[in-house]
Image: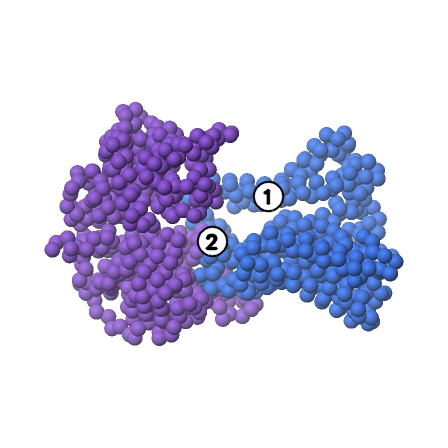
Chain colours: A blue, B purple
Amino acid sequence: MTRIRLNDVLLVVAPIFLALFFTTVILLAVGASPWDAYRNILAGAFESPEKIADVVAACVPLVLCGVGMCITFTAGQWNVGVEGQIILGALFATWVARNLLWPQAPVLTLMLLAGMLGGALWGVIAALLKIYGNVHEIFGGLGLNYVAQGLAIWLIFNPWRPADGATMSGTDPFPDPAWMPRLAHLRVSPLAVILALLAVVVVYFLLRGTRWGLELRAMGKNFRSAYLLGVPSTPRLLTAFAACGALAGLAGAIRCSARYGRMIPDIAGGQGYLSLLVALLAVSRPQWVPFIAFFFAAVGVGSPRLELNMHLDSSLGGVLRASMVLAVMMVAGLRMLLNQRRARAAGETPSQDVVESGDAAG
Amino acid sequence: MRVEIVDLHKHFGPVRANDGVSLTLETGSIHGLLGENGAGKSTLMKCLSGYQLPDRGTIRVDGQTVVFSSPSEAIQHGIGMLHQDPLDFPQMRVLDNFLLAFDRRMLPNRRRGRAILRELGERFQFALDPEAEVTSLTIGERQQLEILRLLALGAQVIILDEPTTGISAPQKIKLFATLRRLAEEEGRSVVFVSHKLAEVESLCDRVTVLRQGRVTGEVEMPCSVERMVVLMFGRHIPPAECKRVELGPPVLRVEQATIPSYRLTVQDAGIEVRAGEVVGLAGLEGSGQRLFLRACAGLERVAAGRVHLGGQEMTAAPYRRFLAAGVAYVPANRLEEGLVGELTVTEHVALVNRSGPFFIDWPATREQAMAQIQHFNVIGRPESPVSALSGGNQQRLLLALLPAGLRLLLMEHPTRGLDVESARWIWQQLMARREEGTAIVFISADLDELLEYSDRIVVFFGGQMSAPLPACDTTVEQLGYLIAGRERDKETR
């Protein structure tokens, strides 16, 4: 029993040290002080209330997309089309903001709902391509990301062109009611934070406590068995992609409404890919997503400080995050290998282990 | 080249696939290796061709002891194997496949390769286009490519594992002519692994028969078919006395069904199964019985013919409609397609409860799982992941998950890999269901099991379904003949 617990702790601690070790080696190689670098990142993220608010705001899309991807990961799907789903959500929300000149509450509600609809639509297309077109969801998702990007640029440079000419800085700012209210002078919207936390709770209970979540888990672990046991795979795939897409679309709507106040070509800003890493680290457990997202956001907000103070490239933060994901996967893979080897050495009598642990638990 | 295998052992856990097998292959002869599924033929040949290391035992090539740790070491000593599924790269051209095998340099010499391929092809009258893609070839042509590849690699001993499955009759004639020529004119040795008596009879010089991992006999050909059948299946107790069960109305009716697959097509299969009846499907693996069983649950496409369920047309219906109509399918590979290894017993109980509420009541489901565990004697706990249960307990759980009042229960190998106690318990449960009027159709490789529990048995051979045999008038020997593709009557008349 103690050995298993030790393993679990190692799975969390070892990758952190491995990733820190790796970035430290890089820093030493370029002749920078690792200590100063890490201190600068920390200071850049937490030195003032404004910075902390930025970190929290940066968390929101990561949390929304991260828990969304927990749904599709649970169903065994590599939904890499989240980036495109964010863009579609932002586009739908922008349409509402530009066309419905209503008071703030209905406009914002409609923008968020439209964003979810747009993202869900894009997710469902990827699922349909997979189910009826035999297109693997990775390729379908990647392709749709480019289509979404193209669509956004066309809209910004043609029908939604500002009066003084189109630029990469996007459309005209939204009318005031379409801006999400912020907390005093800080760049964080409390409503967005509440929505993100709500998403975590809802997805947690959907995956844990409902037939739908159980069926997605069965499909993700063993598609053929789930099918023979009677899980209706087509509707479950569609709803999983729709749910993930809706959350990503919500993130897109929040980004254009709360962060930029307009639609810009780079509205997704790589958040979709970054949240893929968040979901990977969370091993599809929604309750872990906020913490991992917070760490990722802090590194993201803090790293530009490296450039200012140490003349290092801020992409070092990206290296730190990515090497952590690689380290986690490596440690997880190693652990699985060790377990298999141990099972083989023990003469393949896994049933005994369970009886033992079961007794201890009961 | 003379190859001796002496006292070879290969165990997989408790299964003794080869249990002290000795065999000598003489130069220039065709040696048959005969036995039913699981007799240990493939294991023995995999050890000989370097795919597996034997646990114990010696292999000698021309008197010298050799140890092969990979197929390429075996081929260096002149031993090559043609697998049942050709080991080629379907998306590549014939020539590339050929070069890949024997010209391992950075820049293979395509011209030389093409010349060798043509020369070898002409020698055996194989018309293979070097530029054709392998996907466009038939299985027979892919085999020809494999044979040429092995010859180009200098194979002196060529092992063929069930080579006649899935090839046409003219290709078979050509294959046999080629094998004879390889042995008689070129002095190579051929090992012909098969379960088909007629083929072994017409081709081989000597035959070794394996049963349950041991050699039960080695005979010079010609030899009586009867003797080979006895060696293959062993002697058995006389059939159990007949038990008459009141049968209900027809449940399943299949009419002249054609069920195609890449390797094998089931032709013209038809049967009517009545409520409370047990029908056994016999045949060596890959003879069509699994295709047929899966088609009865809508898991395989029926290209022609009809499937009726209780008078309702179900021919093109999807699996879900069969499920809703009270059909259950229990596969043989429990962890691959029956259960979800990572989910717990409780989660399985919740999963199959299709009418349950959207929000799962976990405490109540756990109670239910506990009750099932007790009722079905599963050794495990509600929170045990299913992969941690033993095979017998997994099978018990699968039965526990089946809904009550099934109309038709379809099972692949209900007791394969189970100990005697578990197997008997499983059949008690199945018989109780049959009493309640469930029709049962099952596949088994165990002739005793087929004869003991079925009311009627059908035998599959090469995609053909035999007429149903009443189990109580059938002997193990008769079944053995049919399974190996021989009609006993023709033989004795």
**What is the x, y in percent for residue B334?**
41, 55
**What is the x, y in percent for residue B45?**
32, 38
Q: Mark 1 falls on what kind of element?
A: helix
Give the camera-side residue of B150 and B248: B150
Can you see residue B222?
yes
Residue B341: assigned label? 2
Residue assigned mark 1: A329
Instruction: State which chain disc 1 sits on.
Output: A
Can you see residue B215?
no
**What is the x, y in percent for residue A68?**
64, 58
**What is the crowding at mark 1: few (fewer than 14 residues within 10 Å), some, or many (at least 20)?**
some
Is residue A25 placed above or below B13 in the rendered structure? above
Total marks shown come to 2
Q: What residue type is labelled 1?
A: Met
What is the quadrant of residue A199 in the picture?
bottom right
**What is the x, y in percent for residue B203?**
22, 42
Q: In this view, does B231 lie to the left or right of A190?
A: left
Q: Which amino acid does label 2 sit on?
A: Gly
Residue at image point 51% right, 64% down: A232
Is residue A28 placed above or below B456 in the rendered structure? above
Residue at image point 15% right, 43% down: B223
Q: How far apart are marks 2 and 1 (CA)?
A: 21 Å
Is residue B57 placed above or below B429 in the rendered structure? above
Residue at image point 29% right, 54% down: B462
Q: Is residue B26 left or right of residue B492?
A: right
Do tags 2 and 1 sit on the same chain? no
Instruction: State which chain disc 2 sits on.
Output: B
Q: Which residue lies furthest to the top in this view?
A: B64
Q: Mark 2 falls on what kind of element?
A: loop
**What is the crowding at mark 2: few (fewer than 14 residues within 10 Å), some, or many (at least 20)?**
many
Residue at image point 51% right, 30% down: B107
